[in-house]
Structures are given as structure tokens and as C-alpha cells.
Image: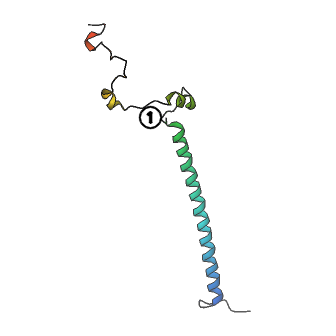
Amino acid sequence: MAPPPGPGDPQEATSGDELRESRKARMEALCAKLTMKAKKAHQERADERDRTTERWSGLRIVDRCIRQEKWDASMRGKDLVPIQHLGGLSAPEGLLPCARGPSAGPFR
């Protein structure tokens, strides 16, 4: 019967290296699996965000009344104007601005 390998025995070093490599390969596989799972979850959240975000205004819409395609078709060719810029807009040529002001309302 052969004596058990000692600390300086090359057979033990090879076994230790194999064990270390095996552990390293398992950790790399686990890390790759977790990374793929995180990427999939991130992609699903991004898809959900894109599905619920209106393209023209950037607002989040949960329950749509109009199909996205129909809304996109109706918005095509239109300009989006931020609220703070509404006062600076002028009427298109040929149209007169409204003659009624705040004091000319029906309830004077």
C-alpha cells in the first residue's frame, strides 16, 4: 500500500489545480447564467416601458383608448409645441386671431 500524498507531492498539486479549475469553471457558468437572467429582465422592463410610453410626448400611457398605430397616423406631420412656447405662436396666414378677449365673454 502506497503512503498518502504529502504536501509537496506533485500528485496533490495536480489534484488541487484541477479542483481550482473546476470551481472556477462552475463560478464562470453561474456568473454567465446570472448575467443572462439580468439582461433578460432588463430587456423585459425596457420593452414594457416602450409599450406604455407615448412616442410623441414621452408621457406614460397605461390604458389606451386609441390604437398606437392609429395615433401615430393622426400625429404624422404635426409639430409638438411645449406649453411654455404657446404664447409665442402666431396664427397662420389668412387666419385672424380671435376677436373676443377675456372681457368680451358671454358673462360680462
Q: Nearer the viewer, residue 21 or 44?
A: 44
Q: Position of residue 96 (x, y in %)?
A: 34, 16
Q: Quadrant of the C terminus?
A: top left
Q: Which residue is mark 1?
A: 57
Q: Position of residue 17 (x, y in %)?
A: 61, 80
- Residue drawn where x is 29% and y is 7% of the image: 107
The residue under the point 25% across, 12% down is 103
> Looking at the rendering, which quadrant does residue 88 occupy?
top left
Q: Is residue 98 above or below residue 19?
A: above
- Callout count: 1
In the rendered image, the residue lying farthest to the front is 94
- Helix, strand, or loop for circle 1? loop
Q: Is residue 86 left or right of residue 60?
A: left
Q: Residue at position x 28%, y 14% from top?
A: 101
Colour scheme of this structure image? rainbow
Q: Nearer the viewer, residue 41 or 88?
A: 88
| 88 versus 108 height, above or below | below
As shown in the figure, which amino acid type bears the numbered disc 1? Ser
Quadrant containing the N terminus is bottom right
Seen from the viewer's position, the closer of residues 9 and 82 is 82
Which of the 4 quarters of the picture holds residue 35?
Answer: bottom right
Q: x, y (%) of residue 85?
A: 33, 31
Furthest residue toward right: 1
Question: Tag 1: Cα neighbours inside 10 Å, few (<14), some, or many (≥20)?
Answer: few
Q: Position of residue 43 (x, y in %)?
A: 55, 48
Vertical comparison of 43 with 95: above or below: below
Among the 4 quarters of the image, the one containing residue 98: top left
User: Which residue is at 65% across, 82% downward?
Assistant: 15
38 to the left or right of 10? left
